[in-house]
Image: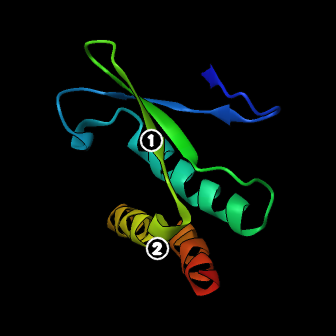
């Protein structure tokens, strides 16, 4: 895990196989990160825009930012993901977060 400049903040890494984001290793962890990240920012537990790092097969690293203006779109994608995988407790949590946005 790449350490962030801010104390006590670990930014996760996700590996990309191929050229697009449909091939993220650890897709459950990625969506967990989105939901938890948004929840922490809403609760004011942190004030961060750096969601994660994407690491490509060729070793290139991309910083993935998630600004507040993109929370709704991102969390709706995660809701879609968890609904597809029938993770209904997580869906309930996301619906509660959507009401706070």
Relative to the observer, which residue lies in front, 71 or 33?
71
What secondary structure is found at the residue carrying circle 1? strand
49 to the left or right of 60: right
Q: Are marks 1 and 2 in contact (CB under 8 Å)?
A: no
47 to the left or right of 53: right
| Residue marked by disc 1 | 64
Q: Earlier in the sequence, mark 1 or mark 2?
A: 1
**Crowd around label 1: few <14 · some 14–19 · many ≥20 (10 Å):** few
22 to the left or right of 12: left
**Crowd around label 2: few <14 · some 14–19 · many ≥20 (10 Å):** some
Q: In the rendered view, would you say 34 is above or below 22?
A: below
Q: In the rendered view, would you say 48 is above or below 56?
A: below
Residue at 72% over, 28% down: 5
Residue 36 location in percent, x, y? 63, 56
| Residue marked by disc 2 | 72
Q: How is the image coloured?
A: rainbow
> Image quadrant for the C terminus?
bottom right
């Amino acid at each position: 895990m790449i350490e962030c400049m801010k104390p006590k903040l670990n930014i996760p890494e996700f590996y990309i196989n191929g050229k697009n984001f449909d091939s993220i290793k650890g897709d459950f962890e990625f969506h967990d990160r989105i939901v938890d990240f948004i929840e922490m920012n809403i609760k004011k537990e942190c004030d961060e825009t750096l969601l994660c790092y994407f690491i490509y097969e060729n070793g290139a690293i991309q910083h993935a930012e998630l600004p507040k203006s993109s929370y709704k779109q991102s969390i709706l994608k995660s809701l879609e993901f968890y609904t597809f995988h029938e993770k209904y407790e997580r869906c309930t949590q996301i619906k509660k977060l959507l009401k706070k946005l």
